[in-house]
Amino acid sequence: MKMIIAIVQDKDSNRLSSEFIDHNIRATKLSSSGGFLRSGNTTFLIGIADERVDKVLEIIQQTSHQREQFMTPPVNLDNSLDSEAAFPVEVQVGGATVFVVPVEQFKQF
């Protein structure tokens, strides 16, 4: 048995949750926030049999897409820096960060 921890952008979480339901994959959905852009994320915790791990990873990969987004860097009060630093810059966001870890024991009460 494995525990899959998948962190996805909020924009992808509903679609991913629906795919899990369609494929009879039970997942716990937690709200979380990212450190880089402080944007909303969703963390899924999935306990799954070893032989189904690849299917879960495939579903996550197909539903969690990277996209371009503009962000405005924090304002710096240092006048010696270039004034163009305050303009929005394009960054890649989205996709999924996934951890697959072994489960030593599983119990249901």
Image (cartoon, rainbow, N blue to C red):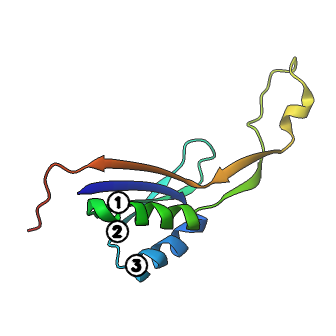
Where's the C terminus, which quadrant? Answer: bottom left
**Which residue: 52% across, 58% down?**
8
Is tag 3's residue or tag 1's residue first in the polypeptide sequence?
Answer: 3
- Which residue carries the number 3 mark? 23
Q: CA distance from mark 2 to mark 1?
A: 6 Å
The front one of 23 and 8 is 23
**Which residue: 63% across, 46% down?**
37
Q: Residue furthest top?
A: 80
Q: On residue 60, which mark appears? A: none
Element at label 3: loop
Q: On residue 27, which mark appears? A: 2
Q: CA distance from mark 3 to mark 1?
A: 16 Å
Q: CA distance from mark 2 to mark 3?
A: 11 Å
Q: Amino acid at mark 2?
A: Ala
Q: On residue 45, which mark appears? A: 1
Q: Amino acid at mark 3?
A: His
The image position of residue 100, as x and y in percent, is 36, 50
The image position of residue 12, as x and y in percent, is 57, 67
Q: Residue furthest left?
A: 109
Question: Of discs 3 and 1, which sits in the foreground?
Answer: 3
14 vs 101: above or below: below
